[in-house]
Amino acid sequence: MPALEGVTPAQAPVDPGTLAMTAAAEARWKAAPQGVREGVALHGVAVTRLEHPQPRLGDFYASLRDDRVPWVVTMDTLFYLAHLALDRALADMDASVLAPAVATMLRRLDVRLATESHGSPPDLAAAYLVARGVVGVALAFVDSAYTPPAELAPLVEGERARVVAHSAVGVSPWLGVPVDYTAMAPAGAADRDEAHAGWYRAVAWLELAGLALEGRGEDRVHSQVDVGTARVHARAAMLLTRMLTYELDAEAATAWDRVERSSELLIGEAADATPREIQAAATMSKLDLRDRGWLANVVAVDRVRRAVARGRASRVDDGFAGPRVPAGGVDPLAPIGRLSPSFRLVAPRETPDGELLQALVFPLVGRLTRSEPPPTARAGVRALPSSLDVAAWLGSGDARAILHTTGDDAYGLYADTLDRLTSARPPSGSIERHRTPYLSLLDAVETWLEPSIGDRVQPGASTAEWRARKAEVALDAWTTLRHDTRPMARVQSTEVRLPAPEPSPSTVPVFVEPHPEAIAKLLAFVRQLERAMVAGGALPAHGAGVIVLDEVNDLLWDALGMATHEASDQLVPPDCAARLATLPARLRALEAVLEPAGAADVPLVTDVHEDLPSARVLEEAIGRVEQAWMIVREPGTHRLWLAFGAALPHAELVQPAGARLSDGAWRARLASDGDPPPDALERPYLVSSK
């Protein structure tokens, strides 16, 4: 967005005596503690916790409107609106695409595998048992009427019990490989009832119960299974893939393809081998999966499974093999740790921030180089990453400085690894930043952390406190992105009717935090999301998700118009201000229709990384709405107003892996224990309101 010449800059500190206030705002100012007034004057912003914390943005902004104080739509609010759009679109996708397709695929596989297993060659008996088990456990969660056949019942019930307990990481008696049962605990809103929990567990099982493709000693790859078990697993993967070929079962093949394409369209490529890779490797070896005969041939099976394994070399270190940093250093292009790739019937997705979190732990960052270990260390190695890693990767110099001050970058190769991954980001403006909506939202977060033409008119933009707050907003946005892209972790909104907005002039000045570049990226993200998902068949054209997307699109468009006028120091047209003045009522109406699905409240939580040896999980969370006191400049008149807006606190938690939090559990904790202390960002702009 081009900068306009002749815009007079506004800078902090500001003389409080020059601030324009309504009578109600002046009363708040006089009642505020000295620390709040000093923070606002010196830094252009201060954040206070509310005496009666509010979990919803609509209620918060409606209270500002009703109290007749000037209010500002913060970037916290706009990023959260984008979250609502993504969350509701994915809720529709879960209900209309993912659940029906997974159910169809599982039922077809269950019938076909059972039929084929009778009279199969002895060499394939164990593989059929494994393949049927992968399907049977998921089907037991999806279909309450499902009764596994006698030969599978003990195995299915045993695995089902371990998934429901979700209390440990252990070796599956059935598969013979480590399975993280703790990660199958219902997340998001999936613990609403048993039906939603069942669907979440079914997909989590399919994502996490991987089949090994290589055994110990092959290609110098660490593995938890021997070669014989890897062959059984590979054959099971081939049997599953065989049943998903269009010629053998068009219904099952179409269902799997819908699941895979929807996830790929939204987030990105699979993080592990899928039926697609098995099929491609068999074809390259001139083997036809429709012909079951060659599956008994060890040489042919080995050729296919090794081809898949070499093509899907993973860089993930799961901690089981106890990796060590070589004396000569780590080759950043070489595999590390236990890297035997796995086959997943439904694979988790590969994302650049996920790679970042995994790369910034041992062994890629080397050993600790100082005597006092930071909180992320375990036995001298960096066992857990930090959300500050993500903020630094996306361009926050303040986050990088905190990492250095706290010693959390005091590992031999940390700086080199972070720099390498930062430089690997596609250049600004590249189409690669927008290959999926997931990547587009990451790009919007990075844009927010960059300077804006709106900084000239924002008095606090030059202060360290303002930059620190920007980092927190960025982490909030990233937290919601990770939260929203967990499959089957939400409840669909079945009835969404929104009243038509009725623009009217506001009785007090209203503003938008002026970062038009980031707002434009958010608007583009919402439009890309709708067009891609509707066109790709992942989102019903007239469902609740599209209604929410359209409403968020309109709100972001109004915000962009206001922010552009503010940044350009141009008087805001009355119709633009009147449309923005409807935001409190529109937010309230949106939250009202989302309340039955549990999607209205701001606090949410998601896990982003696990340290398996210590059974600890890193969780990112957003707390209850707080109040930002902000100096904003009225375009054209240059008057500096005291305005109020929503601030969303970010929290980072380290939990036992078996005690992961759902949204409901996190909200209950906030209600009982109160707000958590400031996290690693330290929040220098947070001031006590007492």
Image (cartoon, rainbow, N blue to C red):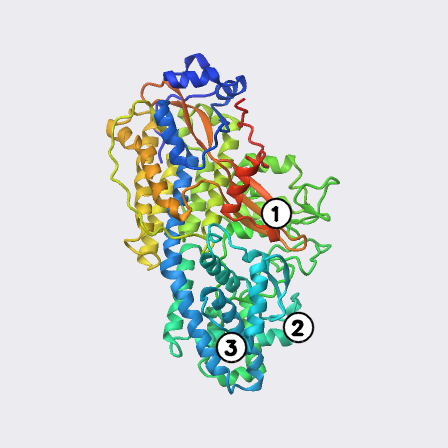
Residue at x 39%, y 20% (from the top left corner): 641
Residue, disc 2: 226
The type of residue carrying mark 2 is Asp
Label 2 Cα crowd, 10 Å radius (few <14 / some 14-19 / many 20+): some
C-beta proximity under 8 Å, tags 1 and 3:
no
**In this view of the protein, which residue sits in the foreground, 117 or 63?**
63
Task: Check the image and name the residue furthest to the right.
Answer: 371
Q: Earlier in the sequence, mark 1 or mark 3?
A: 3
Q: Amino acid at mark 3?
A: Pro
Residue 253 vs 46, above or below: the answer is below
The answer to which image quadrant residue 327 occupies is bottom right
Q: CA distance from mark 1 to mark 3?
A: 38 Å
Residue 441 screen position, x and y as percent: 42, 46
Q: Is 111 placed above or below 569 here?
A: below
Return the x and y of residue 16 as percentages of the image width and height. Answer: 45, 14
Judged from this view, the residue extending furthest toward the top is: 17
Q: Give the residue at x 64% y 71%.
A: 215
Q: Is residue 37 visible?
A: yes
Q: Does residue 304 appear anywhere in the picture?
A: no
Q: Mark 1 sits on what residue?
A: 655
Q: Secondary structure at mark 3?
A: loop
Q: What's the CA distance linking mark 2 and mark 1?
A: 33 Å
Q: Position of residue 210 (x, y in %)?
A: 56, 66
Query: Residue 149: which numbered mark, if any?
Result: 3
